């Protein structure tokens, strides 16, 4: 959530190209996290995710 808010806030102050690049960087920081994997797994299994902040 923090990354999304930061991308929105900072993206409004950038050009479109720079904003999109910043959004991609923000997403890439989240790819290896356990919570992202848990979210995808829970979605696929149609259950509520058990996020642990990792």
Image (cartoon, helix red, strand yellow):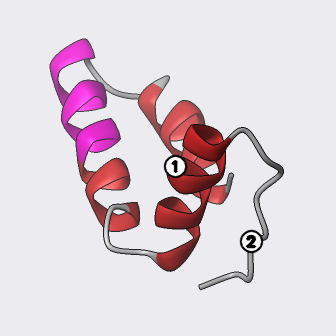
* Residues rendered magenta in the picture: 16-24
Number of residues whose C-alpha sits closer than 10 Å to that of mark 2, classed few (under 14), some (14–19) or many (20 or more): few
The stretch drawn in magenta includes residue 17: yes
Number of residues whose C-alpha sits closer than 10 Å to that of mark 1, classed few (under 14), some (14–19) or many (20 or more): few
Q: Residue furthest top?
A: 16
Horizontal relation, residue 21 to residue 49: left or right: left
Q: Measuring from the top left, give residue 9's x and y in whole percent.
A: 59, 36
**Circle 2: element type:** loop
Q: Measuring from the top left, give residue 23's x and y in whole percent.
A: 34, 38
Taking depth in this image into account, of 37 and 45 the one nearest to the observer is 45
Distance (Cα) linking label 1 and label 2: 11 Å
Magenta-highlighted stretch: main secondary structure? helix
Which circle marks residue 40 in the picture? Answer: 1
Which tag, 1 or 2, sits closer to the chain's start?
Answer: 1
Taking depth in this image into account, of 16 and 54 the one nearest to the observer is 54
Residue at position x 76%, y 58% in the image:
49
Horizontal relation, residue 11 to residue 1: left or right: left
Taking depth in this image into account, of 17 and 23 the one nearest to the observer is 23
Which circle marks residue 17 in the picture? Answer: none
Q: Residue furthest front?
A: 45
Horizontal relation, residue 10 to residue 14: left or right: right
User: Hey, which quadrant is residue 45 in on the image?
Assistant: top right
User: Hey, which quadrant is residue 22 in on the image?
Assistant: top left
Measured along the vertical axis of the image, is residue 30 above or below residue 52? above
Measured along the vertical axis of the image, is residue 25 above or below residue 29? above
Residue at position x 59%, y 85% in the image:
54
Q: How many marks?
A: 2
Residue at position x 63%, y 40% in the image:
43
**Circle 1: element type:** helix
Q: Measuring from the top left, give residue 52's x and y in whole percent.
A: 74, 82
Which circle marks residue 51 in the picture? Answer: 2
Residue at position x 19%, y 36% in the image:
21
């Amino acid at each position: 959530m923090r990354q999304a808010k930061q991308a929105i806030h900072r993206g409004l102050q950038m050009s479109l190209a720079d904003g999109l690049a910043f959004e991609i960087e923000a997403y890439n920081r989240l790819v290896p996290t356990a919570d992202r994997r848990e979210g995808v797994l829970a979605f696929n299994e149609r259950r509520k995710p058990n996020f642990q902040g990792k």
